[in-house]
Structures are given as structure tokens and as C-alpha cells.
Amino acid sequence: MKNKIIIITGASSGIGKALAYECARMGAKLVLASRSGATSPELLQITQDVLDVRTDVTKEQDCEALIQKAIEKFGRIDVLINDAGISMRALFSEVNLDVLRQLMDTNFWGTVYCTKFALPYLLKSQGSLVGVSSIAGYKGLPGRTGYSASKFAMQGFLEVIRIENMKKGLHVLIACPGFTASNIRNVALSKDGTAQGETPLDESKLMTAEQVAFYIIHAIEKRKERLILTTQGKMTVLLNKFFPKFMDKMVYSHMAKEPNSPFK
């Protein structure tokens, strides 16, 4: 990763922040996109090769500006990591449809916009296009309609980009962490669009964002096409291929045990 020009969306917290720090330690030059700013004094102690771009990935013009500023600063793009994302927790029968639109605008359209404008430069460098998806992109999770739908859509989109450019040297990685200790559940949207405010999971038992970042970077270096993390995640994907009805029941039972689950 040394001297690679890497764009990371959602870089102010969670996996995106962990990716930024790890890439910086490896000598990469960073373009960090977030709505609140992602450059900290601690990060600047590691590297000065950082461009911080305030970006709302739901806005096409913001994503275009992000890519153009990266080119103006560094002249090329080697890696685009689409990490910006939000979650939700509510029954579909009760959720405000605007919540689903927010999920799709951020998780799916944010990936589409950034990829659209970065693709010519990634093709030129024969670089890496990365989407940080989820096990929810393989198996629908009850209470997370918008989240699962957006991650299924992201994965389908990235698969097509990979196939369309398979003879052009473009590397496309779909990375699917399992449940990860991060802020995403605290700020997950409830049925009316307000932040959930607390996580329903024991975060201390989950894979850390730093661990996830390590595996994603390793997968980029090895130019892997897919990355599925955690034993639970791997078993979910595998068993769902052969026993989907059984997995429906297992997923329902597992998610129903969450504190304050929206269904029983």
C-alpha cells in the first residue's frame, strides 16, 4: 500500500476510520471523505499525505467533487474504498419509507456515484474498487429491510462492474464483515428516522473495526474478489446456499433474541 492513492468514504468513524489509520501506517496517501471531517491530530502524526474532503455521498455532485479533488491533489487514484453506510432497525410494516430511501441513498447510491466518477482513473491505474458490504448482503435480516436491500444492491452492482471490466485489469473486492464493534448500531435509524441511540448487541464480543480493516487491506493486496469475515458470517453464507429455509428460521430466532427486538 506504500505510496498508493487511496480514497476512503465514511472515514470519520468505525471501519472507515480504522482503514485510514492502517493505510497511513503502511505509507499510503489518503483522501478521506466524510460529512464531519476525518483528519485528526493523531492521524497527522502518522502521515501528512492526507486530503480531507467534506462529502455527503448521497449527493452526486459531492461525490464528483471528491474524485476531482483527489486527482487535483495526487494526480491518480489507486484504490477507492466505499465504506460510507448507515443501518436501521424496524419492522417493514411500521417503518417510514423515507428511512429506506436514506439507506439506499447512502449505502447503494453513494457507492454508485463514487464509483462512476472514479472508474476512469481506476482503469488507468488498474487499481482496486472496494465495497464494504455485509453478511446482510447475502442473507436478509429481519428488522433491517433497508440495510439488507442496500447491501444486496451494492453487491449486485459491484459484481457487474467486475464482469464488465474483467479484461481491463480492474480489481473489485466485495468485503462482508459480520457484526463489528462500531458506532453504526448506535446511529442506526429507527422506524421514524431518529437515531436508535444504543446498540442491541454486546459490542465487546464482536470483531473490532481494526481487525476488519486489517483483513480488508490484506484482501486488497492479494486482489481477492470476496472477503467474508467471522465464523458466524461464513456459516451463514455457506448454509444459506444449501438450506435457505432452515436459515430463515435460524436468522429469525437469532434476531428475535436481541434486546427490545421489534419482533418476537
Image (cartoon, rainbow, N blue to C red):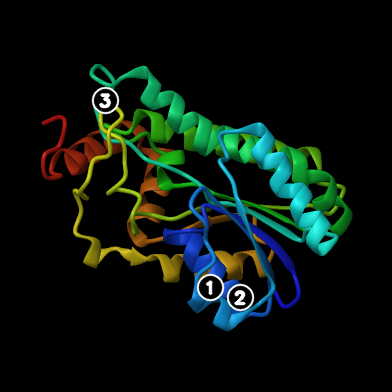
Q: Is residue 226 left or right of residue 128?
A: left
Quadrant that contains the C terminus = top left
Give the amino acid type for the residue marked by disc 1 in the picture.
Answer: Tyr
Q: Which residue is labeled 1 in the image?
A: 21
Quadrant that contains the N terminus = bottom right
Q: Residue at x 51, y 52 (%)?
A: 10
Q: CA distance from mark 2 to mark 1?
A: 5 Å
Give the amino acid type for the residue marked by disc 3 in the picture.
Answer: Asp
Q: Residue at x 31, y 31 (%)?
A: 245
Q: Which residue is labeled 3 in the image?
A: 192
Disc on the earlier residue, 1 or 3: 1
Q: Residue at x 48, y 64 (%)?
A: 17
| Contact flag, marks 2 and 3 (Cβ < 8 Å) | no
Q: Residue at x 49, y 78 (%)?
A: 42
Q: Which residue is labeled 2 in the image?
A: 24
| Contact flag, marks 2 and 1 (Cβ < 8 Å) | yes
Q: Name above or below for residue 1 compared with residue 228.
A: below
Q: Name above or below for residue 113 compared with residue 3.
A: above
Q: Position of residue 212 (x, y in %)?
A: 45, 65
Residue 21 visible in the picture: yes
Q: Position of residue 107 (x, y in %)?
A: 51, 38
Q: Secondary structure at mark 1?
A: helix
Out of 213 and 65, give the one closest to the viewer.
Answer: 65
User: How many dots with numbers?
Assistant: 3
Crowd class of label 3 (few under 14; some 14 to 19; many from 20; radius 10 Å): some
**Quadrant hosting residue 99:** top left
Crowd class of label 1 (few under 14; some 14 to 19; many from 20; radius 10 Å): many
Q: Is residue 167 left or right of residue 138?
A: right
Disc on the earlier residue, 2 or 3: 2
